[in-house]
Amino acid sequence: AGTTVEALVQQSADMLIPAEGYRVGQVSTQMSIDSVEGDVPQLSFKAADPIGSFFDVATPSISFSPPIAGNVAEILVSFQALMFINGSETVNVTLPGFLNPTSVSLSLPPPVYESASSSSHSSSSSHSSSS
């Protein structure tokens, strides 16, 4: 009684996170306890780590202009997010193997809707989206 309990569901249980991600304040995830000392009915979790997601795995895309290896290029990163991206948040883009820099943070102008597209100038660097 009064002791914090942490239970870990191992990856080996093959429990998949929903494809649409997990939102702050999402009340659909619940737990209950069946106990000899007394049952606890379904309760929503008060805190959870949010997990963003893309509308379709195929939607993140990247293009280069001009598309010439070893040159500086304009890079267009495009994606459709399932979650709202707040104007104060950034989209971090990383492409290992590219130079000067290998990652950038893109600030998106408010208001940012459920789908977003951004472009960035970067010398010999390219970007893959993560949010």
Image: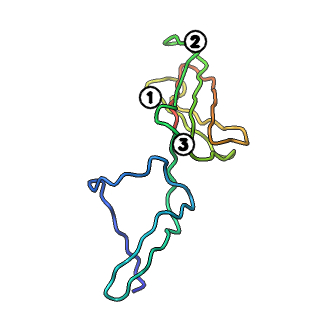
Q: How dense is the environment of label 3, judged by Cα within 10 Å: few (below 14), some, or many (20 and up)?
A: some
Residue contact at pointers 2 and 3, CB within 8 angstroms: no
Task: Name the foreground residue: 105 vs 45.
Answer: 45
Q: Earlier in the sequence, mark 2 or mark 3?
A: 2
Q: Position of residue 87 (x, y in %)?
A: 69, 44
Q: Which residue is mark 1?
A: 96
Q: Is residue 71 above or below residue 130?
A: above
Q: Is residue 51 above or below residue 5?
A: above
Spot the residue most to the left.
Answer: 12
- Looking at the rendered structure, the secondary structure element under dot 1 is loop
Give the residue type that dot 1 points to.
Pro
Task: Name the foreground residue: 125 vs 13.
Answer: 13
Q: What's the residue at 37%, 87% (across, down)?
A: 38
- Based on the displayed image, in which of its 4 quarters is residue 2 positioned? bottom left
- Looking at the rendered structure, the secondary structure element under dot 3 is loop
Q: Quadrant where the C terminus lies?
A: top right
3D distance between C-alphas at marks 2 and 1: 19 Å
Q: What's the residue at 58%, 39% (across, down)?
A: 91
3D distance between C-alphas at marks 2 and 3: 26 Å
- The mark closer to the camera, 3 or 1, is 3
Q: What's the residue at 50%, 69% (across, down)?
A: 44
Q: Quadrant where the N terminus lies?
A: bottom left
Q: Is residue 69 above or below residue 117?
A: above
Q: Which residue is mark 2?
A: 66
Q: What's the residue at 62%, 38% (across, down)?
A: 115
Q: Which residue is mark 3?
A: 131
Q: Position of residue 77 (x, y in %)?
A: 57, 28
- Based on the displayed image, in which of its 4 quarters is residue 120 positioned? top right
Q: Position of residue 130 (x, y in %)?
A: 51, 39
